[in-house]
Structure formats: C-alpha cells, structure tokens
Amino acid sequence: MARKDEDAGEIKVTDHRRFDEEGHERPEAPPHEESAPVEPPKEAASDAGQDKGTAGRMPPMDFSTFVLSLATSAQMHMGLLQNPATGKQERNLDLAKQTIDLIGMLQDKTKGNLSDQESKLIEQVLYELRLVYVELQKQGPKGQEEPK
C-alpha cells in the first residue's frame, strides 16, 4: 500500500504480501489470520454452483473440459450444433473464428505447462476446427458454394 509521508513529501511503499515472487513465505510477513481453510458442508459441496436441473450432470472442470467446452462453442457458431438458447443451427463465422483464435491463444500461452495428453488434445481440437472453418469459409455465409 502506498501512502504519502507528510514530513518528507515522499511516497513510501510497504509490501504486505505473505509470499514473495518465488512463492516462499516472507519471514517479515504478518501472521496469517486463518489457520485452516474452511470447507463447505458435504451436502453443499456437491451442489455448489449448480442448480437443481444440472446437479450431478456437469463434468469436473479441468483443462481438457475447458478446451472441449470452447470447441463446442466454436462448432455451435459454425452451425454444426444447435444453439441451446434458440434450438436452431445458426452460423456466425466471425464468432467461430474468435473462439478458434481464443483456443490458439490458450495453446500459445500454456506451451510447456501442459501434460502430453493436454497438448495433444488442444492441437487436435485446433486442427479439426480450423479445417472445418476453412471449408465453411469457402461455402459462403448461407452454406452455398461460392462461384469459382
């Protein structure tokens, strides 16, 4: 927190973070107020963040599930899947491209931090989505082949 020292007219910065940049606890850090994390009751933990209609049907969230969720969104935007809100297959290639680019950015930013399985998954998902996207670009906005 920064504050102005009224006597000297200077700003003094004091770091109150408990851990340093490498993740080691600072010896001068004030003691942590909580001694143990508070866990929700067992009943609440299984339903946390889920309404009655989705309880027990949601897959556990991990990196692979996240990538597959983004891939499903891209497929929906390409008109390959129904939009759950409208029940229709709608094509919006701009949104599809944005989602594919997002997965590509995620691949770049996580390079070297993924397991072999996660790396192969994101590589395969991007390959397949890009292939379909290029084919749809050739067809034009209504799914009609553009004149050659």
Image (tube, rainbow, N blue to C red):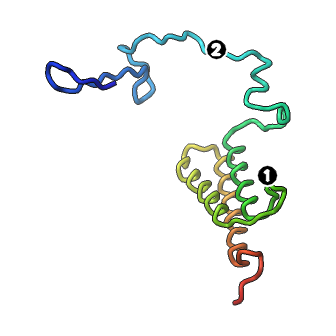
For residue 4, what is the image quadrant? top left
Q: Is residue 13 left or right of residue 83?
A: left
| Position of residue 15 measured from the top left corner of the image (x, y, whole percent) | 34, 23
Q: Amino acid at mark 2?
A: Val
Q: Is residue 16 left or right of residue 125?
A: left
Residue under the image location 81 percent in, 52 percent down: 84
Neighbour tally class for label 1: few under 14, some 14-19, many 20 plus, Cα within 10 Å:
few
- Which of the labelled discs sits on residue 85, or is there none? 1
| Position of residue 52 measured from the top left corner of the image (x, y, whole percent) | 84, 31
117 vs 100, nearest the viewer? 100
Residue under the image location 68 percent in, 49 percent down: 67
- Say what secondary structure mark 2 lies in: loop
Q: Quadrant of the C terminus?
A: bottom right
- Say what secondary structure mark 1 lies in: loop
Q: Is residue 64 left or right of residue 105?
A: right
Residue under the image location 61 percent in, 60 percent down: 98
Image height of 61 relative to 34, above or below = below
For residue 113, what is the image quadrant? top right
Q: Amino acid at mark 1?
A: Ala
For residue 31, what is the image quadrant? top left
Residue under the image location 83 percent in, 32 percent down: 55
Q: Is residue 1 left or right of residue 131?
A: left
* Tag 2 residue: 38
> How many marks on residues?
2
45 vs 105, nearest the viewer? 45
| Position of residue 69 measured from the top left corner of the image (x, y, whole percent) | 72, 48
Which of discs 1 and 2 lies nearer the camera? The answer is 1
Q: CA distance from mark 1 to mark 2?
A: 37 Å
Point out the tag, 1 or 2, that comes first from the N-terminus.
2
Image height of 54 relative to 84, above or below = above
Image height of 89 relative to 4, above or below = below
